[in-house]
Amino acid sequence: MNTPFHHITQSKDYILSIGFHRLILFFVLLLVIFLTFYLSQVQFLEFKISVYGNSNKRQSFTNQTDTLSQSDKIVVISHAYENLDWLNLLDDEQIPYIVYTRSPNPLAHHRKLRINKGRDPAAYLRYIIDHYSNLPLSVAFVHGHRTSYHQENPSDIVVTALRALQWHKYNYMPLTLRLTHHTFKANSSDLQERVNYELWEDVLQKELGPPPELGIVTHCCATFAVKREAILAHPAIFYSDILDYIMYTNYSDQYTSRSLEYTWHIIFGESTHICYKKCNIFLCDSKGNITVPMTKKKSKINYTIQE
């Protein structure tokens, strides 16, 4: 008997005995097992690539944040619709900055505030909350405009104020010499005085004690520099509570932002009544005039955080 032919005949008979439908089912099962294994390997590879990519993104953002936190200073800009061309001057001085904006069309490297409410306090508080654990030595908080009616002596926030500022000298340093004063009264006919009192009582009192009975005297208009230790004197939740209050109160941010304008200096450790001399805050010459150091010729470096 021809043995190979005999084996072929037996195989044919076996296949016929089990039926073609069972054979097809068998091959389908093998195909399903193969595809399941193959797809699992592909998904695993994609997962590894995704994790690696996200890790690189997080590392890149962490490196940018670390670069700013390792700097000894930063300027935080509260922006709405102002022209920010003056930021190039900060590049020239190699002063790091970050922009928090309420603009509906923010630039890619600006931080968009989620709710368009709160004015400059929303930007300042958002920065503190975001960077509470990695603050630089000093932070300057300013508006988006370079000059304004309330920016007096010095009149230019960049060319004079930020360049001539004696960074790190005091816990709290106003960037204008113009003074303002206000009071805090629960039952006042003046809405601003009532908002001052209620905001203090609702969110400031637990850290700062009762509202100032004799009101406040401070430097106008919520542009100032503050040292890290003054910010860290209060827990992060304190700043979160203030931000939540101004976001969700029924009062207009026209009033709540002014209430905070009147109290920033107290929040950061100053007495209720302050009045700094020009040359205590800014560099001055022998005649008592503000003097600005010569700009060092360096290549421009943009220190804005880019997401």
Image: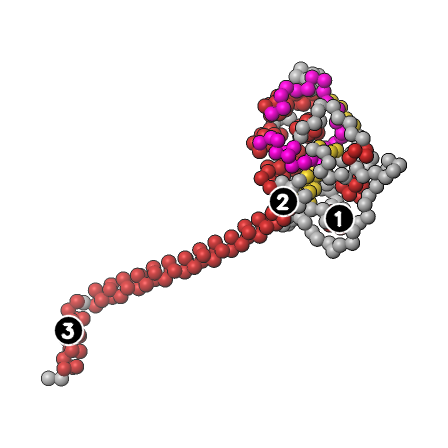
In which image quadrant can residue 141 be found?
top right
Which of these two is toward me, 141 or 5?
141
What quarter of the picture does the N terminus occupy? bottom left
Amino acid type indicated by mark 3: Asp
> CA separation, marks 3 and 1?
91 Å
Is label 3 in a helix, a strand or a loop?
Answer: helix
In which image quadrant can residue 237 be found?
top right
Q: Is residue 210 above or below residue 234?
A: above
Q: Which residue is mark 2?
A: 69
Q: Name the spot of residue 22 as percent of width and height, x first.
A: 21, 64
Amino acid type indicated by mark 2: Ser
Q: Residue lying furthest top in this view?
A: 187
Q: Nearer the viewer, mark 3 or mark 2?
A: 2
Which of these two is toward me, 5 or 95?
95
> CA separation, marks 3 and 2?
80 Å
- Give the extent of the magenta segment: 207-235
Q: Which residue is mark 3?
A: 13
